[in-house]
Image (cartoon, rainbow, N blue to C red):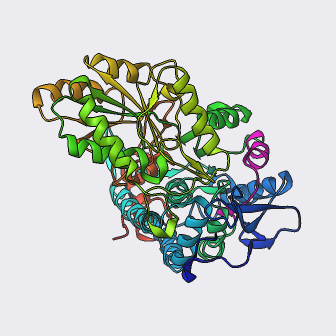
Amino acid sequence: MLHPVPHEFDIKEPIKHKTFLINGKIASWKGEYSEVKSTILSSKKNIPYKLIGYSPKMDKKHALKALEAANKAYNNGTGKWPTMKVYERINCMQKFVDLMKGKRDEVVKLLMWEIGKNLNDSRKEFDRTVDYINETIKEYKKIDRDGAAFQNNSGVRALIRRGPLGIVLCLGPYNYPLNETFALLIPAIIMGNTAIFKPAKHGVLLIATLLDAFKLSFPPGVVNIIFGRGREMASPIMKTGKVNVLALIGHSSSAISLQDLHPQKNRLRLVLGLEAKNPAIILDDADLDLAVNECINGSLSFNGQRCTALKIIYVHEKIKDKFLKQFCEKIDDLKLGLPWENTLLTPLPEPHKPKYINDLIEDAKEKGARVLNKKGGEISNNYIFPAVLYPANEQMKVYKEEQFGPVIPVISFDDIDIPISFMAESNYGQQVSLFGKSEKKLGPLIDSLVNLVCRVNLNSSCQRGPDVYPFTGRKDSAVATLSVHDALRSFSIRTFVASKDNETNKEILRKLIDNKESNFIRTDYYL
């Protein structure tokens, strides 16, 4: 039986998205299209897909046209955008966010249909993205203020500012196709870079709704938005060697492959958000109710499809039985539902994902684990009910792989070196959640953990926000940082004008400032 769809969220006819943005022009695609299917609704058993739209399947020729437009707009740093007054770039960004806000309902609806994110989280993603842009503008003003004062050292006067790096290839993820993507794109362009942006395979229609906003807000060539298969579009762009920054959130294998295509890798800056295997460590004196609730939200929010999700749980032997009993009971009480029903568990957007999760479960069972919760691993269309696996061990795929879905391996320990060794040997180093009360136990442990990961969450689940805090990782988890403060610095470089401190140069500088002959040499700033 077909699930009823609330009128305001319904898509009655497939959305025929036919356009792209290159060099300030929205053009219609005349070639092949990819079907955009949703897994969240089905009228027939075992047929989980609904056609919700079409998206351009663009080619190498147009990928290179987008690169050409970005290159022309940057023009070796002499283009209108990189040399523009700071307040003018800020005005462009403010215009964009104002136009973007008018698309909230449409974007939220498509977040539900394209990736299965529930209504509350979809609204949160949109609003958080708006906040991110506004915080970025605020931080950019601060950077500009800090750079408005001359320094004088050893007889050399200098005005130091942050300048753009060049052309950015921006590739976003499917799980946060708006927020995470814009955490790359927004700081990149506001710093004066130009960009080619290709959305993820899931989330193309919602980006299409914003093409007009980009076109109306920024000069031609500053933001170029193309659609198609990632490798087919990104590879020819990278091979040219004209990309200065690869900005990608996804898998390390993709980052490595694209990086290797660049003929001059020493010139390529990387801003990458990659995989994680964030553990929870539950000490014997932990608040059990708190730990259970935080671990459920941390491991299963958006079905565990977050790099910041808890992906393995270490619980002390003394409280193992109580924790697992309570943990499994609460998970089995969770409901599967459609996004507008605001359930924690929704259909998985990737058609192959239930089988992949089931394979991880079967592999773990073959190697000694049991599925502890009654509903664990049940599959219906593109739902799979979360499975708690215990005891997990290093022979299992789920021990090392980032599962990115609703399966939770659990390991008990009586020696804290066991979870510490896991983290030290892991290829990843993003975050950890630590549950306990004793400062004598927590203090030394925190001192070790901060050198293994980049964020220790005390008695709380792993998360990205608030966006003004650092967000990065060690080893294969990240390169550079994506917080508001740090992202602006990741997409820029310090550059300055220096002069010997003599009367002639002082007079020249005074005239430059008084007559406003330079956008770089000035001492005013934007409030």
Residue occupying the point 54% across, 79% down: 6
Q: In the image, is 269 to the left or to the right of 60?
A: left
Magenta stretch, residue numbers: 221-239
Q: In the image, is 313 to the left or to the right of 321?
A: right
- Observer-nearest residue: 305 or 134? 305
The percent coordinates of residue 149 (x first, y second) are 33, 56
Quarter of the image where one finds residue 329:
top left
Residue occupying the point 77% across, 62% down: 35
Q: In the image, is 62 to the left or to the right of 478?
A: right
Q: In the image, is 13 to the left or to the right of 194?
A: right
- Observer-nearest residue: 109 or 451? 109
The percent coordinates of residue 435 (x first, y second) are 23, 36
What count of labels does the image hold? 0
The percent coordinates of residue 74 (x first, y second) are 66, 57
Q: Which quarter of the figure is the N terminus placed in?
A: bottom right
Q: Is residue 461 visible?
A: no
Magenta-span inclusion, residue 233 = yes
Magenta-span inclusion, residue 200 = no
The residue at the far bottom in this view is 7
